[in-house]
């Protein structure tokens, strides 16, 4: 094991509006601590409320950004700024649930040119990139098929996983079609073919999932994607 006195501390921004009653927020520190122990790296993580994000400068001192669940966020633009900073600066990024949705929204607006891209949970006008799910996934689990030879498949070490959700919104059918030609590649689907994970293939580590894999930590199970995220942050 490396000497922790000389090993640089990994600094992770947890972007979202912390709520002690949210299970994912309870799980995230446990998942990070477990992953850091596996990697034998010291870690510091800081909750960054979306209302406190006024510019991209808020993330200049971090080694990775995790856009966490529990949306709608108090400040949507703060969440989008976090995703954009990570994307444009090759900073390791992990988005789960609401973080997945807003990473998609940021990409649609700023890469694909969908300036009117909207989220049905908070918007009433525009093209709904994020739309209500046909069936709610609040406190449900499902099987997800992973695209082979991707960051997420390598993290799990297999091509089929089962994870839990707590959400009512996902990618709209219209946007799913438009995404097929993009570098933001679909890398996970449920049994009905609906999108459950994406990653940016032009980026060292930019992965977002609709499912909340971090909640494994509440049951004492590892969260492989969190380990992969920290490993990328350490590079």
Image: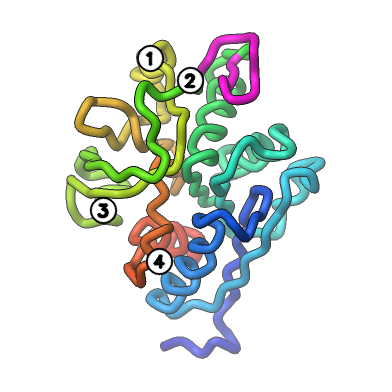
Image coloring type: rainbow
Q: Residue at point 45% right, 66% down?
A: 31
* Residue 128 lies in the magenta-colored region: yes
Q: Is residue 174 magenta?
A: no
Are the residues at dot 2 and dot 1 in contact (C-beta closer than 8 Å)? yes
Alpha carbon distance from label 3 to label 1: 27 Å
In the picture, residue 4 is in which quadrant?
bottom right
Q: Which residues are magenta?
A: 117-129
- Residue tagged 4: 217
Q: Mark 3, residues whose alpha carbon is within 10 Å: few (<14), some, or many (≥20)?
A: some
Q: Is residue 192 above or below residue 10?
A: above
Which residue corresponds to mark 1? 173
Label 2 belongs to which residue?
Answer: 131
The label on residue 154 is: 3
* Cα separation between marks 2 and 1: 9 Å
Give the alpha-carbon distance from disc 2 to disc 4, as whole Å: 29 Å
Q: Quadrant of the N terminus?
A: bottom left
């Amino acid at each position: 094991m490396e000497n922790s006195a000389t090993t640089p501390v990994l600094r992770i921004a947890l972007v979202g509006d912390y709520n002690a009653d949210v299970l994912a927020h309870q799980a995230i520190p446990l998942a990070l601590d477990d992953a850091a122990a596996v990697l034998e790296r010291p870690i510091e993580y800081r909750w960054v409320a979306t209302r406190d994000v006024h510019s991209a400068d808020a993330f200049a001192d971090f080694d990775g950004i995790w856009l966490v669940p529990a949306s709608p966020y108090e400040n949507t633009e703060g969440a989008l700024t976090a995703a954009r900073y990570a994307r444009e600066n090759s900073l390791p990024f992990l988005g789960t649930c609401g973080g997945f949705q807003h990473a998609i929204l940021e990409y649609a607006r700023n890469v694909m040119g969908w300036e009117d891209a909207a989220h049905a949970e908070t918007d009433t006008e525009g093209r709904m990139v994020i739309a209500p799910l046909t069936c709610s996934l609040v406190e449900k689990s499902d099987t997800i098929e992973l695209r082979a030879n991707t960051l997420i498949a390598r993290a799990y070490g297999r091509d089929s996983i089962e994870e839990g959700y707590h959400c009512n919104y996902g990618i709209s059918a219209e946007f799913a079609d438009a995404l097929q030609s993009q570098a933001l590649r679909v890398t996970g689907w449920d049994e009905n073919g609906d999108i459950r994970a994406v990653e940016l293939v032009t980026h060292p580590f930019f992965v977002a999932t609709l499912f909340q894999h971090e909640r494994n930590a509440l049951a004492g199970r590892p969260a492989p994607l969190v380990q992969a995220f920290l490993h990328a942050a350490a590079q």
